[in-house]
Amino acid sequence: MRLSTAKLCAGAVVAAAATGAQAAQPCDWPAYRLFVERVVQADGRVIDRSTDTQQTTSEGQSYAMFFALVANDRATFDRVLNWTRTNLSANQFDAASLRLPGWQWGKRQDGSFGVMDANSASDSDLWIAYDLFQAGRLWKEPAYTKLAYALATQIVKQEVVDLPGLGPMLLPGPQGFRTGNVTRLNPSYLPLPVLRGLAHEMPDGPWTKLAQNAAKMIRVTSPRGYAPDWAAYQAGANGQFVVDPKNGDVGSYDAIRVYLWAGMASMSDPLARPWLDALGGMRQSVAQTGFAPEKVSTMSGAASGEGPLSYWGALAPYFKALNDERGLGLARTHLEALAAPPGAGREPVYYDRVLGLFGGGFIDGRYRFDENGRLVPTWRSAC
């Protein structure tokens, strides 16, 4: 397997030369190397080959930056950041002039490649800002921190709204999510560790209140312990969270990340345990059937189908946080299959690999988040 695209822990490489190959193991991350080799182009573009348009999303770029930081791979981090700047933000992505990245780029109907939807995705924007703040701290690079402030400032300006009766809430994107007094929301867009990390860096921002409102949204919209893909807030004299008018109460591929983020939060965070406790339905389903349902009705609790392999990547930290040894054991077994190199002629599926890296990396101890949401990667101590 080629190693040229993943610059891994220099300290471990030196140690390996002196004491043998085993010394490199704490920092070598085979699943990440496979991701970089097969999903990330040489120019820093993350490709979802499972789509007809061979699309790239700002989400994919933001996750790749996070994984590169966990792997101490600054070269890949910079390549992904630079591709994002050039292609998703039209070269307007610096501290002085910042344009939120368009969320979707790929092969357009006329055969050309470029931005397909210029509306930004707020979850990706949050992750990129978080990645930059953490990179600035961990790699001691003020330029990353300065850029993070600029991006976070634009997120607050364009993607955070004050909802009557609730307070600040994150729109899924600047355009298209408000009709009359109803605002559509995505619970998977608000990871507690990311919000805490942003609050730590920008204490005067809305992040702490956002975390509190996100926790409330999870509690109210998950009455049977299952998170929905989408939800909504209806403003009025008695503003309230309601079922999403477009997608209904289904919980599936978006919502699976809600369990992932909840499982990764530091249990020292006062919101972590209530957040996790609100999501008990998934644990109950797996205990009864041995697998995660592909889709659930969040209002009735009715489940259908068997979730794909990648769901186990998202659920591994969730079971770990719950101290559910059986669930975690099932997740580990499935993660081994997910991490295996694809067969001949079969490319790794982008979303599968992403969830596998998040979940597998976390339960293997490659990274964690402290109570302030700061990233604590293994390479800081083990490499």
Image (tube, helix red, strand yellow):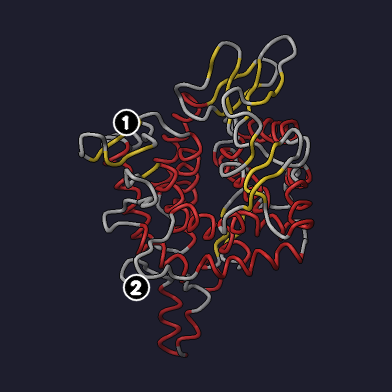
Q: Position of residue 13 (x, y in %)?
A: 41, 79
Q: Position of residue 361 (x, y in %)?
A: 56, 63
Callout 2 amino acid: Leu
Q: Are discs 1 and 2 less than 8 Å apart at CB?
A: no
- Residue drawn at 79 percent across, 51 percent down: 284
Decide which of 34, 15 is in the foreground and name it: 34
Outermost residue to the bottom: 19
* 10 Å crowding of disc 1: few (<14), some (14-19), many (20+): few
Outermost residue to the front: 305
Callout 1 amino acid: Ser
Q: CA distance from mark 1 to mark 2?
A: 36 Å
Tally the numbered discs. Answer: 2
Q: Note whether 153 is above or below 128 in the view shown.
A: above
* Disc on res. 82: none
Earlier in the chain: of badge 1 and badge 2, it is 2
Q: Position of residue 341 (x, y in %)?
A: 44, 70
Whether residue 109 sits left or right of residue 137 in the image: it is left
Frontmost of labels 1 and 2 is 2
Q: Secondary structure at mark 2?
A: loop
Q: Secondary structure at mark 1?
A: loop
Q: Position of residue 243 (x, y in %)?
A: 67, 26
Where does label 2 land, which residue?
3
Whether residue 215 sits left or right of residue 118 in the image: it is right
Decide which of 337, 121 is in the foreground and name it: 337
* 10 Å crowding of disc 2: few (<14), some (14-19), many (20+): few
- Residue drawn at 49 percent across, 51 percent down: 134
- Residue drawn at 62 percent across, 36 percent down: 187
Can you tell which quarter of the image residue 221 is in?
top right
Where does label 1 land, which residue?
97
- Residue drawn at 47 percent across, 67 percent down: 31
